[in-house]
């Protein structure tokens, strides 16, 4: 009996040591997922993520002046062609080292209050630099989809002081890691009628499935720089599959579906230079269809099918024809070669 109690006691001590050791060792690692919705379809908007840091004397609650630093990196360097690496990097497999972590890419990325002089990927400061004794860090989110990591390190004089930033901790060096998912999400409302409430559910873009035996489309346009180019909202994907079926029934032709959006949406830089292009292909609601012998302006079957899906009084989905310079033209403009479907 005594022996059993002693073993239990030892186990408790061991569990206790394991449980608190990260907090009292090199730093507390706090994982948090932040979903950002940084953009609509325009090229010059961004959202801002805020981090507030404060330090307290745990005996009298007084605000202290503590040094800190915050750094932004990608969650994993892009390595190889694993599906996860490609998705973490938002579908881009090029120029990893120059990938912008903030927006605008040539402006300030991380701002600590009004001081923007430091390296935009890292801010260094103290919690009372501004006279308020609370630090505010602003991170301008990039328009590029992908998974980033924010690491905040705060140093306090001794463990009797508390550091607060999304939770409070009492160790001398506090490390907070935050996973930031920058992505386009669909807003889906789930209704719980029997409880009388509904809540917003954010779902990521879905991939157009590889065609099965009964499907009459092919996926085209995959590039080594952007190998996964067929992500869209559930509505876009369902309508594309439907259009392909009807198009085959009426014409016997297989629909060649080119670029929709990248796995997490956002900037689709077809020239692989991190510069805005393909502006309408950011939110999973637009798809390019290959010309395939028939110019857009001549493909009246496709136009009838696409425009026929529009609800009463709506003008989307709509087949937009583009000229050789990929500029949209009027429906009956003879220069309209390229096919682009706008679903929303
Ligand atoms: Zn790219
Ligand atoms: Zn297009």
Image (cartoon, rainbow, N blue to C red):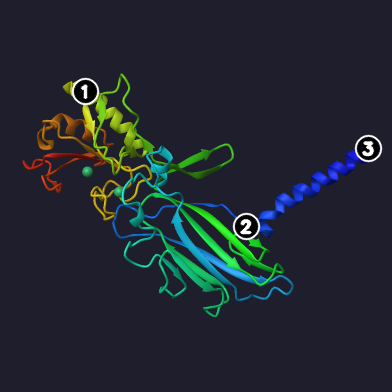
Earlier residue among tags 2 and 3: 3
Query: SS at mark 1?
Result: helix
Name the residue at 40% across, 38% down.
Answer: 82
Q: Give the spatial CA distance, label 2 vs label 3.
A: 38 Å
Given residues 192 and 63, the one toward you in this image is: 63
Q: Which residue is mark 3?
A: 1
Image quarter hosting the C terminus: top left
* Residue receiving disc 1: 248
Helix, strand or loop at mark 2: loop
Residue beneath the point at 28% across and 32% down: 240
User: Do tag 2 and tag 3 residues touch (Cβ < 8 Å)?
Assistant: no
Whole-percent x and y of residue 317?
25, 39
Vertical placement of residue 295 versus 9, above or below: above
The residue drawn where x is 56% and y is 64% is 153
Quadrant for residue 168, please give it: bottom right
| Residue carrying label 2 | 28
Distance from disc 1 to disc 3, alpha carbons, whole Å, reads: 79 Å
Q: Quadrant of residue 133?
A: bottom right
Nearest to N terminus: mark 1 or mark 2: 2
Instruction: Judge whether 15 appears above or below 165 on screen.
Output: above
């Amino acid at each position: 009996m005594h022996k059993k109690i002693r073993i239990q006691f030892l186990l408790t001590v061991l569990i206790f040591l394991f449980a608190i050791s990260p907090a009292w060792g090199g730093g507390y690692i706090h994982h948090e997922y932040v979903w950002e919705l940084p953009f609509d379809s325009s090229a010059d908007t961004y959202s801002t993520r805020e981090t507030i840091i404060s330090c307290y004397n745990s005996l009298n609650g007084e605000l202290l002046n503590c040094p800190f630093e915050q750094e932004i990196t990608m969650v994993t360097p892009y390595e190889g062609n694993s599906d996860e690496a490609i998705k973490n990097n938002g579908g881009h497999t090029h120029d990893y080292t120059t990938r912008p972590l903030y927006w605008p890419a040539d402006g300030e990325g991380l701002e600590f209050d009004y001081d923007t002089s430091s390296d935009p990927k890292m801010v260094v400061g103290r919690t009372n630099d501004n006279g308020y004794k609370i630090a505010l860090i602003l991170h301008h989110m990039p328009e590029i989809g992908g998974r980033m990591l924010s690491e905040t390190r705060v140093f306090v004089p001794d463990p009797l002081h508390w550091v607060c930033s999304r939770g409070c901790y009492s160790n001398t060096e506090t490390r907070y890691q935050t996973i930031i998912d920058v992505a386009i999400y669909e807003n889906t409302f789930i209704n719980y009628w029997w409880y009388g409430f509904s809540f917003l559910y954010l779902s990521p873009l879905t991939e157009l499935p590889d065609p099965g035996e009964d499907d009459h489309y092919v996926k085209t346009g995959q590039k080594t720089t952007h190998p996964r180019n067929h992500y869209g909202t559930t509505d876009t994907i369902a309508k594309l599959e439907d259009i392909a079926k009807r198009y085959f029934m009426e014409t016997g032709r297989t629909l060649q579906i080119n670029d929709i959006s990248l796995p997490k949406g956002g900037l689709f830089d077809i020239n692989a230079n991190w510069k805005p292009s393909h502006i309408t292909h950011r939110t999973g609601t637009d798809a390019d269809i290959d010309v395939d012998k028939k110019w857009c302006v001549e493909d009246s079957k496709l136009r009838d099918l696409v425009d026929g899906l529009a609800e009463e009084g709506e003008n989307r989905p709509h087949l937009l024809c583009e000229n050789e310079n990929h500029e949209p033209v009027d429906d009956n403009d003879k220069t309209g070669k390229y096919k682009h479907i706008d679903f929303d």
